[in-house]
Image (cartoon, rainbow, N blue to C red):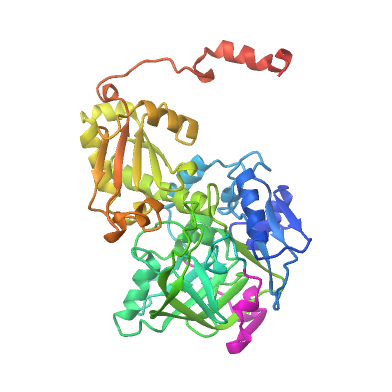
């Protein structure tokens, strides 16, 4: 039996889900107009198996199936983060805390560049369409939320761009709405790398014809890395090699010089026009709202070539109330970069995590209290040290509150986080405000307030470590089941069914 490689091959990832009883193939006809979206949201919210839609209604060009919830949480396996683990070829049992540590450790590994294979060997080249043969309106592109401004084809695909001098190739995720037969409008905003690369084309007078590819069903490790806030100028395809321990096969696009993952399910090739702005949105984003009429002028992509595999499968993310890919990836993976930055600076941090219930707007840090006391610091100075390291910079672009916890708090337990937040900080008094840093425009409390005028401020560091813990060890009994003596807990657990539970 062939060994699966789910991090490198999307179809192996799907097969791994199937073997883990974490995939439901839906052969009943399903309408892309809201029905696909409603099913995927229910699967996210109840942590059900990932849905694979094999029979999509009303498409004039039935070129693909749809996979929903590719990195959602699941109760179908022992580990609720098993899908995220599979994106990295880690055992499905790997919890998020160890996934974050793995990502931090991989930053110290040597990169492994991708290797080019001929087009004749690339699965993504099995079929092709050109020019007016392409009709995005005729494809089964889903309308995901009631209130969305249109059909979003790009929710879990990967944009590929390269600087004019070829020194930096960026792979990234940013949403994209179908606006015509061959057109997509999408977010191209600072400080996203997609904007930085496009601006380099504009600087040489070619901002209306930036070469671009949009790839769907890429190697799962590639889509995960595309979500990470890795440093400016870093090439994702090389970092993917470090994560997987092997080189990624790529192939040259048909109509430009970009290299794309050779096993991609679908590849669209074309250009980005920074000056042709059209209304985009609204869209139900990672914070769980669709604000009626909230469209924005966004640049236009025009596609002139399309290649796709036989029986192609398009993965989608349907963001909203936690937990979906925008939280497990965009939020969760920010934790790895933050942890790396803080450890390098000498901050006594043990763990970092963005609690999913906070919609990726809040970052929790677990601090080693003994090492904290050795620093002879105080809550205000310590909070400012961390805020200065993180909040002005891209890895924390989406984060609006950083919360500091002691080492008795499990920051992966929202129950623990909420308890410590409510009982260990004094509102305002224990917060260090950051009013001059860039705000995240997609956050509802930003775009629905005066903060949107400058897209600035509204960020803070909140100290949820008791002031006395900065000076000495503070002993207390935690008043929940974990606070009882071990022999009592063991006795109770061993007799639990005897009690009648």
Q: Is residue 253 above or below residue 149?
A: below
The image quarter containing residue 195 is: bottom left
- Which residue ends up furthest to the front in the rendered image? 292
- Name which residue lies at 61% across and 55% down: 70
- Name which residue lies at 59% across and 46% down: 73
Q: Is residue 452 magenta?
A: no
Q: Is residue 174 left or right of residue 50?
A: left
From where the camera sits, is residue 92 visible?
no
Q: Is residue 114 above or below residue 393?
A: below
The image quarter containing residue 239 is: bottom left
What residue span does the magenta drawing correspond to? 113-141
- Name which residue lies at 27% across and 51% down: 457
Rendering coords of residue 189 (x, y %): 37, 67
- Closer to the camera in the image, 65 or 338: 65
- Which residue ends up furthest to the right in the rendered image? 28
Rendering coords of residue 279 (x, y %): 44, 73
Q: Is residue 176 above or below residue 487?
A: below
Rendering coords of residue 94 (x, y %): 57, 42
Q: Is residue 348 above or below residue 408?
A: below
- Name which residue lies at 41% across and 66% down: 235
Quarter of the figure that contains the N terminus: bottom right
Quarter of the figure that contains the C terminus: top right
- Closer to the camera in the image, 439 or 105: 439
Rendering coords of residue 378 (x, y %): 22, 30
Q: Is residue 128 left or right of residue 224?
A: right
From where the camera sits, is residue 489 visible?
yes
Q: How many marks?
A: 0
């Amino acid at each position: 039996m062939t060994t699966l490689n789910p991090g490198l091959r999307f179809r192996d990832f799907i097969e791994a889900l199937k073997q883990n009883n974490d995939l439901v193939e839906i052969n009943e006809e399903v309408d892309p107009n809201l029905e696909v979206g409603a099913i995927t949201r229910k699967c996210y919210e109840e942590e059900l198996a990932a849905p694979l839609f094999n029979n999509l209604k009303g498409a004039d060009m039935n070129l693909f199936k749809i996979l929903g919830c590719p990195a959602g949480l699941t109760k179908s396996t022992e580990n609720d983060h098993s899908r995220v683990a599979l994106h990295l070829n880690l055992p499905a049992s790997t919890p998020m805390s160890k996934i974050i540590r793995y990502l931090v450790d991989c930053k110290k590994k040597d990169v492994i560049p991708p290797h080019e294979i001929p087009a004749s060997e690339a699965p993504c080249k099995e079929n092709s369409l050109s020019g007016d043969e392409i009709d995005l309106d005729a494809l089964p592109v889903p309308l995901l939320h009631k209130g969305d401004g249109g059909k979003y084809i790009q929710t879990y695909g990967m944009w590929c761009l390269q600087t004019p001098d070829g020194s930096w190739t960026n792979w990234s995720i940013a949403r994209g709405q179908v606006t015509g037969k061959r057109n997509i409008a999408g977010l191209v905003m600072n400080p996203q790398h997609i904007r930085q690369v496009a601006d380099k084309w504009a600087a040489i007078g070619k901002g209306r014809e930036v070469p671009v590819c949009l790839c769907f069903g890429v190697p799962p490790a590639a889509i995960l890395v595309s979500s990470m806030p890795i440093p400016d100028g870093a090439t994702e395809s090389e970092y993917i090699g470090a994560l997987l321990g092997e080189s990624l096969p790529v192939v040259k696009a048909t109509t430009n010089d970009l290299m794309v993952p050779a096993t991609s399910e679908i590849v669209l090739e074309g250009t980005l026009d920074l000056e042709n702005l059209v209304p985009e949105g609204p869209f139900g984003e990672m914070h769980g709202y669709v604000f009626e009429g909230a469209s924005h002028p966004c640049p236009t992509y025009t596609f002139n070539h399309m290649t796709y595999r036989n029986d192609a499968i398009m993965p989608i993310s349907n963001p909203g109330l936690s937990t979906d890919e925008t939280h497990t990836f965009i939020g969760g993976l920010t934790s790895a970069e933050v942890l790396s930055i803080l450890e390098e600076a000498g901050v006594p941090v043990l763990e970092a995590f963005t609690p999913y219930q906070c919609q990726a707007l809040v970052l929790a840090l677990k601090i080693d209290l003994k090492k904290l006391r050795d620093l002879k610091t105080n809550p205000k100075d310590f909070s400012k040290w961390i805020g200065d390291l993180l909040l002005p910079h891209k890895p924390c672009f989406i984060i609006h509150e950083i919360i500091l916890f002691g080492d008795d708090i499990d920051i992966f337990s929202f129950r623990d986080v909420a308890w410590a937040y409510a009982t260990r900080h004094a509102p305002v008094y224990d917060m260090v405000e950051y009013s001059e840093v860039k705000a995240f425009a997609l956050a509802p409390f930003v775009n629905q307030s005066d903060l949107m005028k400058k897209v600035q401020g509204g960020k803070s560091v909140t100290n949820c470590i008791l002031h006395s813990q900065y000076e000495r060890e503070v002993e207390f009994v935690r008043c929940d089941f974990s606070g009882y003596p071990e022999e009592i807990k063991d006795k109770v657990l061993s007799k639990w069914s005897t009690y009648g539970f």
